[in-house]
Amino acid sequence: MTKSDDTIFALSSGGLPSGVAVVRLSGRQSLSVSAVLAGPLPEPRRATLRTIRARNEDQIDRGLVLIFPGPSSFTGEDCVEFHLHGGRAVVQRLLDELTAMPGLRQAEAGEFSRRAFENGKADLVEMEGLADLISAETEMQRRLAMEQSFGGLSALYDDWADRLTRARALIEAELDFADEEDVPGSVSDQVWSSLSALATSMRRHLLQAEQGEIIRNGLKVVIAGPPNAGKSSLMNALAGREVAIVTDLAGTTRDVLHADLDIGGYLVRLFDTAGLRETSETIEQEGIRRALHAAQTADILLHLDEIGRFSEIDVSSKSVRRFRIGTKMDQHLDDPSVGRYDLCISTATGAGLDSLRNLLIADLRQRQEQTGGFSVPVRARQVEHLRASLAHLEEALAIEGHELDVRSEFLRLAAHEMGKVTGRVDVEQLLDVIFSEFCIGK
C-alpha cells in the first residue's frame, strides 16, 4: 500500500505528568523535523542527548532523541522519538510546535499501528495482540497477547492458508492439464485426506476459543446463595476491600456487585448477588432475578450455604461449573455435614480462603491445558472468519464425485476467509473498527 503523505505525531507514553514522556513522529518529514528541532541527526537507533528547541530558538527541553529510518521501524516509515521530561507544559509546548509545522498533524487513535499493518510490518492478528498486550493486567493476559503480537498465532494461520492454496493449485492443475505427464495423479489421493486433517485441526482450534476468551476477558465467578450465607463477606475477603455492605439483616445486597481480581496471574471477574429467597418486595425480587441470570451465565458458580443449611439454585445452563461452599466454619467446627461441601470456609478467620483461591486457579489451569497453551483465537472477529473458512472447507469435503471445479470454488472461499483473519486479503472495511480500539500514540 502507498504511504500517507502526512507526517503524524502523538504522545506515545501515556498520561501526564510522568518522569519521562515520549513523543513519536512517523512519516517522510520526521527526520527533517528532528533536524530542525534537535540539530544534526544522531546515529539510527542510538539515543542521543540533545537540546530540543522551537523554531524561534526557544529551548523546550533537554532530552533524548532517537531516529528509526524506514523501513526498519515500527511503522515502516521514517520515525523519530523525543524523550522529554514528562511535565504537561513541556509536552504541550513540543506538540504545539509540531502542530504549527506544515504537513504535520496529530495522529488518530491506532494510526501508528495501522501504518505498520499497511506497510507489511505486522498482520491483523499481531496488531490485535499488540492492543491486548498494552491493556493486559494479569500475567496470563500478557502471555496470551505475546503469543499473538509476536506472530505465533499468525504462523499457524499462514500454514493453514498455504495448505488450502496448495490444494487448490493441485486441483486446478488436474482440471486444466489433466493430459500432461508432469501433473500429479489423482487429486483425491493427495488432497482430500490432507484437507480432512486440516478441517479436524480447525475444529479442535475453534473448540478452544471459549477457553482463550476466558483467559483474555476473565473467568466469571458468581457468588450465590440464600440471605446471610456470607456472600458479601466472601466478596470483600477475596477482593481485599469493602466492595459490598455486610450486615446481619437479610436482603442487604439488592443488585449484582462486581470486582476484578488477579488470582494466580489470571483475571477473575467476581460477582456478588442478592440473597435467593421468596419475597413480595419488588426491588428485592428484581435483585433476585438478576442474581439468577448472573448464576446462569457464570463460568463458575460458588453456591454458598451456612454449614448445616442446604438450599438449591436452579441453573439450567450445563456449562456452569458449580462448587458448593459451606460458610461460617468457625461456628460449625464439629458439624457432621461438613463433608457434604466441596469446601468449607470462614471469612472471620480466613480458614479455607487459600483453598478456594487454589480451586479457582486449578480450574483456570485446566482450561488452559485444554487449549494446549496460548495459541488460541481470542477475538470474535477471528473466530467468525475461522468458522466461515471451516464451513467452506467442509462443503468442499462433503461434495461427492468428481465435481472438482465446484469443490475448488469452496476451497477458494475457505482461503479467502482465512486470509481475512490475518489481513492477507482486502479487509479495508474492517480496519477502521480494529484500529479505533488502540490508544492515541499507538
Image: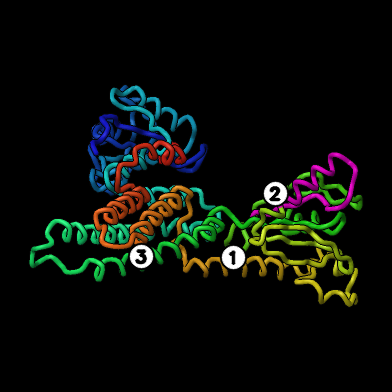
Tell me which label, 1 or 2, sits earlier in the chain.
2
Disc 1 is placed on an element classified as: helix
Q: Residues within 10 Å of mark 3 (few under 14, many from 20)?
A: some
Q: Nearer the viewer, residue 320 or 300?
A: 320
Q: Which colour assignment does the render follow?
A: rainbow
| Image location (x, y in percent) of residue 145 | 45, 55
Side of 280 relative to 426 (left or right):
right
User: What's under tag 2, amino acid-wise?
Assistant: His
Q: Which mark is residue 364?
A: 1
Amino acid at the residue labelled 1? Leu
Q: CA distance from mark 3 to mark 2?
A: 41 Å
Measure how far apart labels 3 and 1 are at the Cα level. 28 Å
Query: Which amino acid, mark 3?
Result: Leu
Q: Is residue 308 visible to the viewer in this orientation of the structure?
A: yes
307 shown above or below 387: below
Magenta stretch in the rendered image: 269-294
Residue 379 in the image: state x and y as whole percent: 47, 50
How many angstroms separate mark 1 from mark 2 (CA)? 19 Å
Q: Is residue 374 above or below residue 92?
A: below
Mark 2 Cα-neighbour bin, 10 Å: few <14, some 14–19, many ≥20: some
CB atoms of marks 3 and 2 within 8 Å: no
Q: Position of residue 22 (x, y in %)?
A: 41, 40
